[in-house]
């Protein structure tokens, strides 16, 4: 695990983009695993800016997103489908047919998403990390052997995501469909972004703590190629 401490979230975004750009420049049909939430927004901004400058094309890139809420329409303003179009897809030349997001609430929906990924290998998986150590929506206690599955969201996760729902936790969906931990670990390379002091405890546990299902991100210690970009605030508790 290569941990790179940056001054602030702007530097995190620029450094993370350098890694992603290298992947796509060397493999124009790269398969990217994409994340939502606040962590990757800066990275997506860098992707958009460099695309608009004419430096990189995504027309042959394929993407698979980590997760989606259960129980809200794809067109809901806070769905992850809406997020991805607003923050990235609508501003670059990625083809709509090449973008994939999980959707649904049944095991069959989970199996279908897993099957869609069976013929590809994710070249670079972008991750954030929750305050409780979740990656994707794999909450504490999720099996390291898990594939795409339906998740009951942790209270901390619901609390953290309330800011996207008028600060009303009652409006936050209580379930999600998420790539499993084993699915994530199949990725060739992983890029994790964490910024802010509220992520410092989780980052330290991920990097320095024991590998345990109570801290889902700790499994990344077992992956062969993980790069973690953190700002000084998120790195505060690292040894």
Image (cartoon, grey):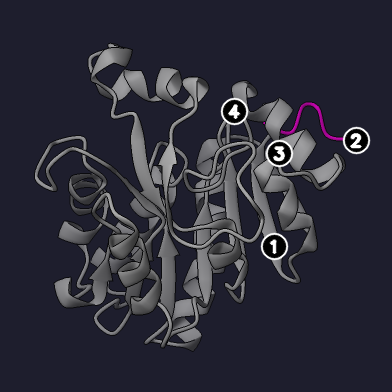
Picture quadrant where residue 195 is located: top right
Please identify the quadrant where the C terminus is shown: top right
- Depth check, mark 4 against mark 1: the one in front is 4
Name the residue located 33 percent from the left edge and 79 percent from the top edge: 61
Q: Which residue is mark 1?
A: 226
Q: CA distance from mark 2 to mark 4?
A: 18 Å
- Depth check, mark 2 against mark 3: the one in front is 3
Q: Which residue is mark 4?
A: 131
Magenta span contains residue 236: yes
- Depth check, mark 2 against mark 4: the one in front is 4
Q: CA distance from mark 4 to mark 1?
A: 19 Å
Q: Which residue is mark 2?
A: 239
Determine whether, in the image, residue 201 is placed left or right of residue 131: right
Q: What is the secondary structure assignment of the residue under circle 1?
A: strand
Q: Residues within 10 Å of mark 3 (few under 14, many from 20)?
A: many
Name the residue located 35 percent from the left edge and 36 percent from the top edge: 175
């Amino acid at each position: 695990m290569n941990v790179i401490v940056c001054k602030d979230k702007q530097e995190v975004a620029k450094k993370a983009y350098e890694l992603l750009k290298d992947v796509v420049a060397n493999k124009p049909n790269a398969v990217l695993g994409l994340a939502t939430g606040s962590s990757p927004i800066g990275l997506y901004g860098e992707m958009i800016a460099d695309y608009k400058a004419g430096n990189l094309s995504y027309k042959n890139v394929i993407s698979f997103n980590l997760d989606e809420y259960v129980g809200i329409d794809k067109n809901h303003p806070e769905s992850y489908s809406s997020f991805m179009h607003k923050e990235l897809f609508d501003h670059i030349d990625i083809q709509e047919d090449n973008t994939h997001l999980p959707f649904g609430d049944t095991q069959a929906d989970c199996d279908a998403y897993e099957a869609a990924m069976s013929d590809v290998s994710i070249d670079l998986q972008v991750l954030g990390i929750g305050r409780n150590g979740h990656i994707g929506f794999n909450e504490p206690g999720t099996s390291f052997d898990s594939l795409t599955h339906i998740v009951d969201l942790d209270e901390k996760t619901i609390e953290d995501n309330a800011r996207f729902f008028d600060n009303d936790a009652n409006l936050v969906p209580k379930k999600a469909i998420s790539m499993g931990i084993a699915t994530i670990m199949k990725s060739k390379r992983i890029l994790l972004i964490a910024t802010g002091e509220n992520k410092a405890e989780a980052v330290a546990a991920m990097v320095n703590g024991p590998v345990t299902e109570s801290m889902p991100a700790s499994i990344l210690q077992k992956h062969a190629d993980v790069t973690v970009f953190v700002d000084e605030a998120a790195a505060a508790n690292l040894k």
